[in-house]
Image: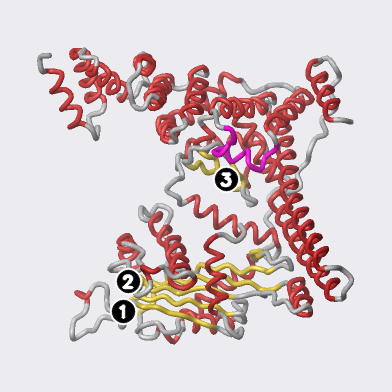
Amino acid sequence: MGIGGIGRALMLAGVLLVLGGCASTRDFSSVKKLDAATPAAATPAEPHVLQLVVMPPDVELSVLTAGGMTEPNAAWTQTAKSLLVDQLGGAEALRGKKLVRFEPPAAADPNGAVLNEIQHLHRAVGNAIVMHKLAVPLPTKKDRFDWSLGQEVAVLHDYAHADYALFIYVRDSYSSAGRIFTQIAAAALGVGLAGGQQAGFATLVDLGTGNVVWFNFLVDATGDLRDASGAADTVKNLLHGMPQ
Amino acid sequence: MSTWRRAALAMLIGLCPATAAPAFDALSPSLPTNYSPPDGDTEGGLWMASRQAEEEIAHSPRRIADAALETYLRDILCRLAPEYCSQIRVYVVRTPYFNASMMPNGAMQVWSGLLIRMRDEAQLAAVLGHEIGHFLRRHSLERARDLETKTSLLTLFTLGLGGAVAAGGVAPAVAQGASGGAQLAALGSLFAFSRDHEAQADKYGVQLMAKAGYDPAQAAAVWRNLVDEQNASGEKQDGSSYFFATHPDPASRLETLGGYARELGGQQTIDAGQAHARYFAAVGAHLPGFFADELHLSQPGRSEHLFKQLLDAKFAPGVVNYCLGEVSRKRDGGKLSDAALAYYQAALGYPDAPPEAHRAIGLWKLKAKQLDEARQHFTAYLEQAPQAGDRDMIDYYLGLTEKAP
């Protein structure tokens, strides 16, 4: 464990974005409006209701120790996952769409491996967007937003019968008592030490093409996923600006 | 005691097996049986991270999902630590380097490069026993706690120095030096801690394999093989063996492991012949693929040593001879030398010879204008590998063999 390249990019982007300590988001989109991935389904008499599959949130909550290490906490993570799923179900930004919850594939499902890999791929692509669009923008990505999870999402399209997939990734840390003590001690000496922080992103993927149609990066020094109201705020922030 | 004196004493002990060996101070587990940690603490967090990593390995395309091979490895693990059998899961991953690792939650990874470097089941048991040693002593947890303590102390120490400077008690340059020293000390002790764990896992591994009825001397043999392979590679520093990086110096390790084996002695109750047959039955079907991975690494010195060892151990002689031919051919820049030809021909003397041996000899014969023989070998290749991707190419060569010289 420890902080790998991805974690560093996330922290760097966080440092660039966080000003004044409250929630801050940056979003990018490649479409203005969401359309059905399978237009054949829509007729003028019966307009197609957009179907959106909500992927299991990729979340990890941890304790920030006095020395600045993050130590994953299983109990908090478990709570945060179920709170996030609950809050996503009633989110304002998702109103008017038919939400499908992603159920893990059966062990014998021949597409099980691909469905799993798509979720890991989202983690990699999302972190690449943070790195190359936000933290250290690549010249070739400056004026365009053209990331994709690739054609293989067709498997997810067929599995969940959805037009779009919503992915959530959050890494959230909370200062331990020791960290708070060192922060205060450092502040007395005029040195600013970072405390716990919430950083994450929401990604909307067109299951017809695999393209990332919308991406929202969130960093929040006060976000808290350990209770329902904190989770509601986090979901609101994560879905802020999502195209309809 | 000075170093040379200690070395001389060690040599004396080594030379005189009659000398009473010191009693083996057996290790006991710190992990309770059927244990899972509470979700809220450090260990719970480690297990959660392990579960995620395990999930990824379980679904990885690199995993070799061969139920028979996994069962075979699990059987060895259960023989080594019967009380913990239900807590251990094993995954074989196709990666051509020597390594096995254990996660805090009992999920073990065994790399394919390790499976072609074991000569028999006892050697495999030595490596698996070492990994169980880490598991039973909860080394991951100790390391996580140690890391937390040291980084925290370091931060507090640095802050304390800052306070002393601010109060005018310590000159800034002195404080800077002290802070750097503390960081170095912390870093050094982190590595030392890891080496202590490795030494302990080594000892635990030998203890478990001896108790299970394996020959404990095979633990040292594993390392001797690796050291020999390293020497044969001609590489100065080992870049490819992940084990060497944080593990104790191989020479002293050999010595220590040999010492444990002598102390333990014990009854070797596992039939070596049967164990060898079991091992070969479990990994045999995968050997051609694993060997191909080894060849792709383009490390002729290392590969040649390995394959010659496997030849001595009578492991899949047809495939191994073919691989030695390939190593020889690649080393000579793709030219077909007599040495390579001899290996390919030797391969054909065994029932497990790969069809590619015929292709290689066919090419050699074509070049030497021995057209009849070339034709025979190319024809045999296409008969044995009708789906060969280079069929068109071989048909073209067959055409060449029919033209009158």
Q: Is B191 included in the stretch rendered in magenta?
A: no
Q: Distance between the residues labelled 2 and 1?
A: 10 Å
The residue labelled by disc 1 is: A31
Going by the image, does A119 lie left or right of B382? Answer: right
Residues at marks 3 and 1, common chain?
no
* SS type, badge 3: strand
In this view, the residue in front, B262 or A103, is B262
Q: Which amino acid does label 3 sit on?
A: Arg
Q: What residue type is labelled 2?
A: Asp
The residue labelled by disc 2 is: A206
Q: Residue, x 64% and y 23% (percent of image)?
A: B270
Going by the image, does B45 lie left or right of B232? Answer: right
Total number of numbered labels? Answer: 3
The quarter of the picture where the N terminus of chain A appears is bottom right
| 3 or 1: mark nearer the eye | 1
User: Could you tell me which chain the residue with mark 3 belongs to?
Assistant: B
In the image, is residue B38 above or below residue B25? below
In the image, is residue A226 above or below residue B348? below
The residue labelled by disc 3 is: B89
Magenta residues span B236-248
Going by the image, does A145 lie left or right of B131? Answer: left
Q: How far apart are marks 3 and 2 (CA)?
A: 37 Å
Q: Residue, x 55% and y 40% (percent of image)?
A: B110
* SS type, badge 1: loop
| 3 or 2: mark nearer the eye | 2
Q: Is B242 included in the stretch rendered in magenta?
A: yes
Marked residue nearer the N-terminal end (2 or 1): 1
In the image, is residue A194 above or below residue B253? below
Q: Can residue A229 be seen in this view?
A: no
User: Dot 3: within a 10 Å radius of its alpha carbon, few (fewer than 14), some, or many (20 or more) residues?
Assistant: some
Dot 2 and dot 1 residues touching (CB under 8 Å): yes
- Residue B340 appears in which quarter of the rendering? top left
